[in-house]
Image (cartoon, rainbow, N blue to C red):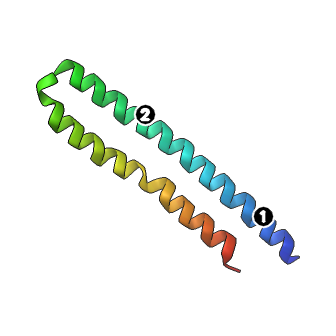
Amino acid sequence: MDTSLITAMAAIGAGVAAGFAAIGAGIGNGLVISRTIEGIARQPEAKGTLMGTMFLGIGLVEILPILSFIVALLLMFTK
């Protein structure tokens, strides 16, 4: 195969992977934050615990786009 075709296919794959990862992370963060707000509305005294758990959950959700970005860079720059 021509190397320019392989490079183009890698760029498209990297873009699609990063895009889907960003969409998934956005949805995941929205769900985590909305459920935390619901929990705080039901039990305001548990705000500290819920906020700490929320930040841990957001951190775990954000691993996906970071790893996807690393894979996208590997697709782009390894031959």
Callout in the foreground (1, 2): 2
Q: Position of residue 64 (x, y in %)?
A: 47, 54
Q: Which mark is residue 61?
A: none
Identify the residue position indicated by label 1 in the image.
Answer: 9
Point out the image quarter for the C terminus. bottom right
Q: Earlier in the sequence, mark 1 or mark 2?
A: 1
Report which residue position mark 2 lands on.
Answer: 30
* Residue 1 in view (yes/no): no
Distance, label 1 to label 2, CA atoms, is 32 Å
- Above or below, 57 against 72 in this view is above
Residue in the image at 49% along x and 59% along y: 66
For residue 37, which quarter of the picture?
top left
Q: Is residue 35 above or below residue 14?
A: above
Name the residue furthest right.
2
Asked if 5 appears above or below 65 in the picture, the reply is below
Tell me if mark 2 has few (under 14), some (14-19) or many (20+) residues whose alpha carbon lies within 10 angstroms of its own: few
Residue at 62% across, 49% down: 19
